[in-house]
Image: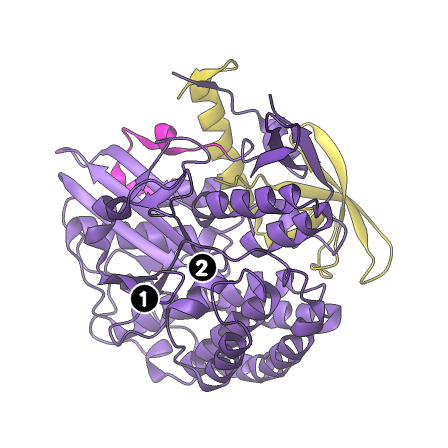
């Protein structure tokens, strides 16, 4: 199954439709394009696909999702798990 | 027993797309598959949780398609507890959410046909999704047996204009799709096509019946109910990321046997049944007439036809009084306890059939689950396409094959030439 981890925009540059953004995802920072989300701005939560931010998330949804990922990763421990 | 690690960085950096291929004894390419290792099965994480909580968890893990998982999961709970959806309001709102989501996803995949039109459709569909989902990414829409209520009439009225414009943009995308086709050289598929239909046998992306046809168009699955699913489809490799699903009664494919091999998605949807909406049905007939047999080509046009259909359905729903007025069945019913038994819920999304199967124990906890995604179901077909193309030395066609089978990975909607596929040799 595909897994979608929310990212938060920390920096925006360029003009539509060629705007791009720097996002924070976990401990990592990466660049993404905002072609599909011209309204996205610093502080917004997004889901990424193929280098594009494709979905704008409300903060509550993003935090719910991150909390669930955290819970599952905790349950699995840091190491490998059998499946 | 296999060992697997779910690492967050693997999830985060899942942009890479890899074809894994083996050479035969003569040194030539023999067989290829698309790597799905970054898509772990999550069922083991769900066991033991209250079954009523499972749809919520799955939606939040697969953040890309929350509406499809939301609707399939709630339908599985309804199947488990024997609840019907009596409220016309609930049915209309669910249908709007689903068709708007399908339109949104297809629009994003058609950017290479025409960017401005695709973005216009995407924007209108996004407004529809927001209204139907209660302005939440994880939809507040369906509840077992019903929905959270009608939509605001003024808001619905304000959506009619944008959706009418989006229909025109979708028609333009359909006209442009033929010249953007990449996949007309793809080899035909000898297996079966599965898609959902309504009680009258017409294609219904939120249908209650499953229909299957073979490559010659003969009926092989005759409009069965969700209860038939557990016995109908098996996994050749149970629990694997690429489980190689097949129609159980036709046997495992391989060694030249078609067996129970099947695919899902727009190509299957258009070959399985007629559409209920007039503009899209005319386009479907033209598409079929241009492509007799089970060719994999025409995938871009097929996507544009289904997009037009989804928007036609959404436009009709915006005129349906049930969407904006509560009926006496609107209040969510009392959910009977899910103690024991099996529930199956399905939707036919932009990528094709998605099925949630839950088995509950006597305490209402999840004893077992099988979540069957379109990506998993099309993996065998995609492997066949990739193998045939590599054997024929047509490496340039690999991208068209991935775009046609549309695995749920970022690469599937990449711009033309931007998929960055790599071919790695397997021992």
Q: What is the drawing colour of chain B?
A: purple
Residue B77 appears in the rendering: yes
Asked if B365 appears above or below B143 in the picture, the reply is above
* Quarter occupied by residue A31: top right
User: Nearest the camera: A50 or B209?
Assistant: B209
Residue B7: give x, y in percent of width and height.
57, 24
Q: Which residue is drawn at 24% across and 55% down?
A: B226
Q: Which circle, 2 or 1, is nearer the viewer?
A: 1
Q: Residue at x 74, y 42 (%)?
A: B420
Q: Name the side, left or right, on which A1 lies relative to B182.
A: left
Asked if B282 appears above or below B287 in the picture, the reply is below
Q: How is the image coloured?
A: by chain
* Quarter occupied by residue A35: bottom right
Which range of residues does the magenta coloring cover? Answer: B40-54
Residue B272: give x, y in percent of width and height.
38, 67
Element assignment for label 1: loop
Q: What is the drawing colour of chain A?
A: yellow
Mark 2 is surrounded, within 10 Å at the Cα level, by few (under 14), some (14 to 19) or many (20 or more) other residues, namely many
User: Nearest the camera: B375 or B364?
Assistant: B375
Mark linked to residue B193? none
Residue B111: give x, y in percent of width and height.
70, 64
Q: How many numbered discs, if any?
A: 2
Q: Mark 1 lies on which chain?
A: B
Q: Name the residue under label 1.
A: B218
* Quarter occupied by residue B38: top right
Q: Residue at x 37, y 78 (%)?
A: B324
Q: Name the residue under label 2.
A: B349
The quadrant of the image that shows the C terminus of chain A is top left
Label 2 or label 1, whichever comes before in sequence order? 1
């Amino acid at each position: 199954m595909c897994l979608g981890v929310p990212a938060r925009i920390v920096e925006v540059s360029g003009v539509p439709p060629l705007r791009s953004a720097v996002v924070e995802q976990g401990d990592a920072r990466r660049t993404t394009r905002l072609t599909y989300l011209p309204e996205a701005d610093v502080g917004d939560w997004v889901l990424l696909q193929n280098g594009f931010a494709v979905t704008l998330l409300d903060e509550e949804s993003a935090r719910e999702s991150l909390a669930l990922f955290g819970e599952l990763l905790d349950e699995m421990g840091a190491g490998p798990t059998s499946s | 027993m296999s060992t697997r690690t779910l690492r967050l960085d693997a999830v985060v950096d899942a942009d890479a797309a890899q074809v894994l291929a083996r050479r035969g004894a003569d040194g030539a390419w023999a067989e290829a598959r698309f790597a799905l290792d970054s898509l772990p099965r999550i069922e083991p994480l769900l066991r033991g949780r209250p079954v009523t909580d499972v749809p919520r968890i799955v939606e939040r893990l697969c953040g890309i398609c929350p509406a499809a998982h939301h609707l399939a999961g709630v339908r599985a709970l309804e199947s488990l507890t024997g609840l019907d959806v009596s409220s016309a309001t609930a049915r209309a709102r669910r249908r709007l959410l689903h068709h708007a989501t399908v339109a949104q996803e297809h629009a994003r995949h058609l950017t290479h046909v025409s960017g401005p039109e695709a973005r216009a459709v995407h924007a209108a569909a996004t407004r529809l999704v927001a209204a139907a989902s209660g302005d939440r990414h994880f939809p507040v829409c369906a509840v077992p047996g019903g929905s959270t209520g009608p939509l605001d009439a003024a808001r619905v009225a304000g959506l009619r204009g944008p959706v009418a414009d989006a229909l025109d943009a979708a028609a333009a995308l359909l006209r442009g799709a033929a010249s953007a086709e990449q996949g007309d050289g793809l080899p035909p598929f000898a297996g079966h096509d599965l898609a959902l239909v309504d009680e009258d046998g017409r294609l219904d992306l939120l249908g209650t019946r499953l229909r299957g046809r073979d490559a010659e168009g003969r009926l092989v699955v005759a409009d069965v109910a969700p209860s038939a699913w557990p016995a109908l489809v098996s996994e050749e490799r149970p629990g694997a990321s690429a489980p190689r699903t097949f129609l159980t009664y036709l046997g495992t494919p391989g060694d030249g046997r078609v067996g129970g091999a099947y695919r899902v998605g727009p190509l299957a949807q258009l070959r399985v049944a007629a559409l209920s909406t007039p503009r899209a049905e005319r386009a479907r007939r033209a598409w079929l007439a241009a492509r007799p047999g089970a060719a994999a080509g025409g995938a871009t046009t097929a996507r544009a036809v289904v997009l037009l259909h989804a928007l036609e359905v959404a436009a009709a729903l915006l005129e349906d009084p049930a969407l904006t007025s509560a009926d006496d069945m609107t209040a969510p019913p009392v959910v009977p306890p899910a103690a024991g038994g099996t529930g199956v819920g399905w939707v036919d999304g932009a990528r094709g059939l998605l099925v949630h199967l839950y088995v509950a124990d006597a305490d209402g906890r999840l004893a077992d689950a099988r979540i069957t995604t379109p990506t998993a179901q099309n993996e065998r077909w995609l492997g066949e396409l990739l193998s045939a193309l590599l054997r024929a030395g047509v490496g340039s066609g690999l991208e068209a094959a991935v775009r046609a089978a549309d695995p749920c990975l970022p690469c599937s909607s990449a711009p033309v030439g931007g998929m960055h596929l790599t071919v790695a040799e397997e021992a």
